[in-house]
Amino acid sequence: MNRLYFNVITALSVLMLSAAAGADDRPAVDLPRMNELSVQVTNNLEELVLKSSPFESVEGFASYYAKRFEGRRTTSGHRYNPEKMTAAHQSLPLGTVVRVVNPASKQEVHVTINDRCAPKSFHFIDLSRAAAKKIGLWGKGKIKVVIIPLLEDKLEKPV
């Protein structure tokens, strides 16, 4: 959403409050103070909108990369490092930060999508070894998880 949308909402709320305060039995509204408060609210709303994602959270399955993929190039051009918090997903944009939650243990991890995995008929994410250990997946093969896209960040250039 753009700044114009928030400015219109702010202006309408100020107009409504000043119209309501226009009655003789109510005190007048301090407009400079009101503008200051509306700017704070606008900044908080902009921050939330920027952090939101057009994608919805989904339930799916998670597994982790096999040892043989260590050092190989991912779709983004980065080399797979099992100690970094990265993941592969079939459709989320590369660079998207995703929160993966294990509903059984309530453990969660934030990973960046930097690779693609084979298309499946169900939602699926392939985690790095470090991420798999953090949510209790290591040694289990695959588990049911909730995948929540958070941000779309730009990945740094591959080395």
Image (tube, rainbow, N blue to C red):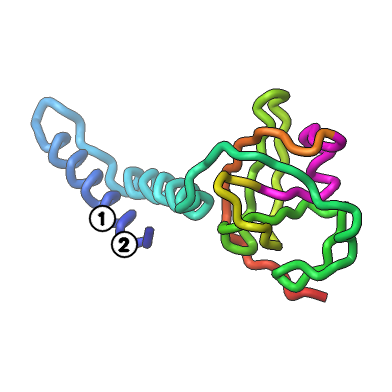
Foreground: 118 or 74? 118
Q: Label 2 amino acid? A: Leu
Q: Is residue 63 left or right of residue 49?
A: right
Tags 2 and 1 in contact by the CB under 8 Å rule?
A: yes
Q: Quadrant of the C terminus?
A: bottom right
Residue 60 x/y as whole percent: 60, 39
- In the rendered image, residue 137 lying in the magenta stretch gets the answer yes
Residue 39 x/y as whole percent: 40, 51
Tell me the residue that label 2 is attached to: 4
Q: Label 1 amino acid? A: Val
In percent of the image, x 87 and y 54: which residue is there? 82
Residue 21 x/y as whole percent: 16, 35
Q: Secondary structure at mark 2?
A: helix
In percent of the image, x 57 and y 62: which residue is there? 93
Q: Secondary structure at mark 1?
A: helix
Q: Is residue 122 left or right of residue 46?
A: right
Tell me the residue that label 1 is attached to: 8
- Tell me the distance, in whole angstroms, between the alpha carbons under discs 2 and 1: 6 Å
Magenta span: 125-139
Foreground: 153 or 14? 153
- In the rendered image, residue 134 lying in the magenta stretch gets the answer yes
